[in-house]
């Protein structure tokens, strides 16, 4: 790296990292393979794994593709190789003729392609294919999270902070800049065995109505009652209807937290879609706190002159 | 007075590919800014805002008629600003009224805005926010 590398690296880190991640100064890595667990899994007095903590450590941004938060199942193995986590296949990365780094234009386009290289995609009913394509193509204007809206569920991914209590669990998602521009979200999710409110009695919201239960050591969070004004993944124009049902699974192994989400929306999808598992790392600092996240104020989109997007 | 100069930028290093990566904007950089055209503009600090999705610097610039125009500059992320030394005013950061020259990439829509790359303060301080545009 050049002399300016330190600044570039710091700025790169700032793109996708929430304040929580910034607080820990993530270690520099050369690939974004999911972190391996280490240490024992702490348990609460009732014997369940304790998911409490500041998560999403090592949220690096490699080859323009952020880790954990929006990796879309793509592992960056090196500057010139990537792999589809879902299929295991190697993905061709942007070809280079020289050893010179890509310029901004090349890098943005390469990263946009790489993000769309994952094979694990939701399957929409044919009548929506054109709509999804157009939403993705026009994502500068159409992506709800480009305008500082909350990311919603499951797009929010793994919360940056979890606080687990006997009868409820608290999730906090600091607002982000970077690839998506979102407001802070929080979810207070009952763990007391209550049932869902009938869907028709719920006004759609960004995080919906969630209830949680334990299946062995896995925390299962079941949600519905969403506003249709979110996308359920970071890219791709993956819209949903107001009847979307999301099942998230959280499993803690030592200092890692593995998350998947299954999206059921028979109104628009041919079959349920399950995310490629994402793995977050516990903030290694035991005394880490979640700082205030910055408010989101979008000022750029009205100045865009092309449809170039992420 | 605005001096516009064209700089060939082979690698602006805003967002990208070289490990460990570059800044990601929530929009495409090149959809908003001309990555091959930087300019300098001199004025006084009106406001600096540490916000998502991008921090912003607003400056007051006197035009040829002496009328004050606002110019708005998108800046790199919070960590980048901190590393560059932008913090509280009493710890070396900016405060309203400070005179400075902003070196920035030009907005493609011709608006009074840009992507700030470097801030040169009248008192000699320099804040390099992203890569050296003359030595990418």
Image: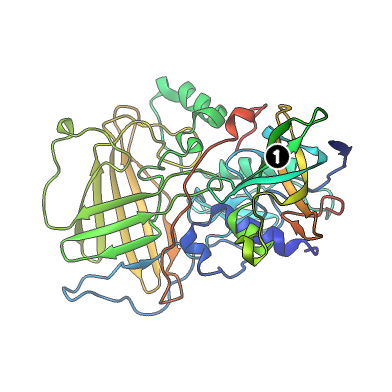
What quarter of the picture does the N terminus of chain A occupy? Answer: bottom right
Q: Position of residue A42 (x, y in %)?
A: 29, 76
Q: Is residue A113 above or below residue A251?
A: above
Quadrant position of residue A49:
bottom left
Chain to which mark 1 belongs: B
Residue on which the image places disc 1: B60
Image quadrant in which the C terminus of chain A is located: top right
How many discs mark residues in the rendered view? 1
Residue A293 on image: x %, y %: 45, 54
Foreground residue, B40 or A138? B40
Report whether residue B19 is seen.
no
The percent position of residue A150, horizontal first and vertical second, equals 40, 42
Image position, residue A128 (x, y; %): 42, 23
Q: Residue furthest bottom?
A: A39
Q: Residue at x 67, y 27 (%)?
A: A306
Quadrant hosting residue B57: top right
Q: Would residue A69 be seen by someone viewing this image from the given angle? A: yes
Image point 68% across, 33% down: which residue? B31
């Amino acid at each position: 790296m050049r002399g300016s590398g330190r600044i570039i690296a710091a700025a790169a880190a700032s793109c996708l990292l929430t304040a929580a991640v910034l607080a820990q100064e993530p270690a520099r890595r050369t690939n974004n393979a999911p972190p391996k667990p280490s240490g024992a899994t702490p348990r609460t007095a009732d014997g369940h794994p304790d998911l409490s903590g500041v998560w999403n450590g090592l949220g690096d941004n490699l080859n323009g593709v952020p880790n954990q938060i929006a990796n879309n199942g793509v592992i960056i193995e090196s500057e010139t190789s990537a792999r589809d986590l879902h299929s295991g296949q190697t993905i061709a990365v942007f070809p280079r003729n020289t050893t010179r780094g890509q310029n901004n234009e090349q890098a943005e386009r390469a990263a946009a392609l790489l993000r769309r290289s994952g094979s694990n995609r939701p399957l929409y009913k044919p009548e929506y294919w054109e709509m999804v394509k157009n939403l993705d193509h026009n994502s500068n204007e159409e992506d709800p999270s480009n305008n500082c809206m909350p990311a919603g569920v499951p797009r929010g991914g793994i919360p940056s902070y979890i606080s687990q209590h006997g009868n409820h669990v608290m999730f906090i998602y600091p607002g982000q800049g970077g690839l998506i521009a979102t407001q802070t979200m929080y979810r207070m999710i009952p763990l007391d065995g209550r049932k869902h409110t009938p869907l028709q009695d719920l006004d759609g919201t960004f995080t919906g109505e969630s209830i949680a239960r334990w299946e062995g050591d896995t925390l299962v969070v079941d949600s519905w009652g969403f506003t249709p004004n979110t996308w359920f993944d970071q890219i791709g124009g993956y819209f949903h209807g107001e009847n979307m049902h999301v099942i998230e699974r959280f499993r803690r192994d030592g200092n890692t937290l593995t998350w998947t989400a299954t999206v059921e929306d028979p109104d628009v999808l041919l079959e349920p879609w399950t995310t490629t598992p994402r793995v977050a790392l516990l903030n290694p600092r035991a005394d880490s706190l979640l700082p205030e996240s910055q408010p989101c104020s979008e000022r750029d989109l009205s100045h865009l002159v092309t449809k170039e997007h992420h | 007075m605005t001096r516009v100069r064209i700089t060939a930028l082979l690698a602006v290093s805003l967002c990208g590919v070289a490990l460990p990566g570059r800044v990601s904007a929530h929009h495409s950089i090149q959809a908003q800014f001309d990555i091959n055209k930087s300019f300098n503009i001199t004025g006084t600090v009106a406001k600096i805002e540490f916000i998502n999705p991008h921090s912003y610097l607003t400056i007051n610039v006197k035009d040829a008629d002496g009328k004050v125009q606002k110019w708005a500059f998108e800046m790199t992320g919070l960590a980048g600003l901190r590393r560059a030394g932008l913090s509280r005013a009493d710890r070396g950061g900016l405060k309203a009224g400070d005179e400075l020259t902003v070196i920035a990439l030009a907005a493609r829509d011709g608006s009074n805005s840009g992507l700030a790359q470097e801030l040169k303060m009248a008192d000699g301080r320099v804040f390099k926010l992203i890569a050296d545009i003359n030595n990418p």
